[in-house]
Each structure stands twice: as structure tokens, then as C-alpha cells.
Image (cartoon, rainbow, N blue to C red):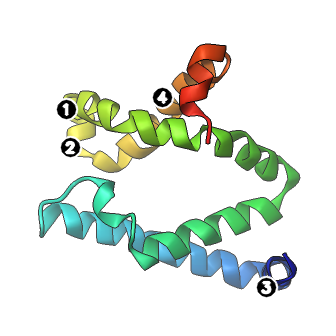
Amino acid sequence: MHILKKIITFCKQHFVIISSMTTVLYIGVITYSIWNRTIIHWAYAEANYGNALIILTSALILIVFSISSPHDKKMIEFVIPATMGIYMIHPFFIGKLMKLHLLYSYPILMIPILFVLCLVIVEIALRIPVLSRFFKL
């Protein structure tokens, strides 16, 4: 935990630089995803799970949001318990949402829509005792 506190302190001290770097890396992730879709014809994110760029960008996004304001930290704490459920049900909804012409043409729009849809479903499932066992980490 000592190293984690040092990392967070460093990020707080250099917040503008870390935020800018995170933004640039996120644009790189989007560019890489577009490259995956157009060059190697792999439209799904599963090809990127082990990618160091994705892992670094995700970690930096969490750090930036957690130190930027207490509201963002509460949102992260709200979303984290639902991540296993979102991971489990998102492939089903990808297939269904890709049938919508707008999301097929602009797949970058599907990410927030898919995330919110899955989050709502998982939050409902977490309130049902029998189903909550399937979705908890």
C-alpha cells in the first residue's frame, strides 16, 4: 500500500500532466481500436484485454477520476462491484446492439450505450439475492 500512496501523491502533484497524458493515451486506444476494426477486421475489445496500452490507460483513467473529485470517486466505487456482471453479459448485448444501423456504422457510440445498459441490468440483478451471487466478484 505504501507504493500506491506514493503513486497517488505523485499523480496529485502532477495532475495536469497525468490528465493530459491519459487523454493522449485514450486517443491512442481509440486509434488502435479503429485500426483493429479496419486493418485486421477485429471489431471486438476482447483482442485488447492483454494489451499494455489498454491496461495503462485504464489504470490512469481510474487514478485521474479518483483524485479529481469526491463525486467521481463515489461513481467509481459504485461501478466497480458491477464489473464482473458487465463483463459477463456484454457479449450478448453487443450482438443485439450491432443490429442497430447507427451503432453498426459508429461503433464508438456503442461503448457508452453498452456500458450503461449492462450497468443498469447488473444493478437490478444485484438487488435480487439469488441473481446477485452470479454477478459478484
Q: CA distance from mark 3 to mark 4?
A: 35 Å
Mark 3: amino acid: His
The reply to whether discs 2 and 1 touch (Cβ–Cβ < 8 Å) is yes
| Disc marking residue 14 | 3
The reply to whether discs 3 and 4 touch (Cβ–Cβ < 8 Å) is no
Q: Is residue 69 left or right of residue 126?
A: right
Residue 13 place in picture, x, y as percent: 85, 84
Q: Secondary structure at mark 2?
A: helix
Of the two numbered discs 4 and 1 on the same chain, state the one appearing first in sequence. Answer: 1
Q: CA distance from mark 3 to mark 1?
A: 42 Å
Quick one: 43 or 1, which is closer to the camera? 1
Mark 1: amino acid: His
Neighbour tally class for label 1: few under 14, some 14-19, many 20 plus, Cα within 10 Å: few
Mark 2: amino acid: Ser
Q: Secondary structure at mark 1?
A: helix
Of the two numbered discs 3 and 1 on the same chain, state the one appearing first in sequence. Answer: 3
Of the two numbered discs 3 and 2 on the same chain, state the one appearing first in sequence. Answer: 3
Q: Which marked residue is nearer to the observer: mark 3 or mark 2? A: 3
Q: Is residue 70 left or right of residue 103?
A: right
Of the two numbered discs 2 and 4 on the same chain, state the one appearing first in sequence. Answer: 2
| Disc marking residue 105 | 2
Q: CA distance from mark 2 to mark 1?
A: 6 Å
Q: CA distance from mark 3 to mark 2?
A: 38 Å
Name the residue beneath numbered marker 4: 117
Q: Secondary structure at mark 3?
A: loop
The reply to whether discs 2 and 4 touch (Cβ–Cβ < 8 Å) is no
Quick one: 52 or 98, which is closer to the camera? 52
Q: Is residue 56 above or below residue 103?
A: below
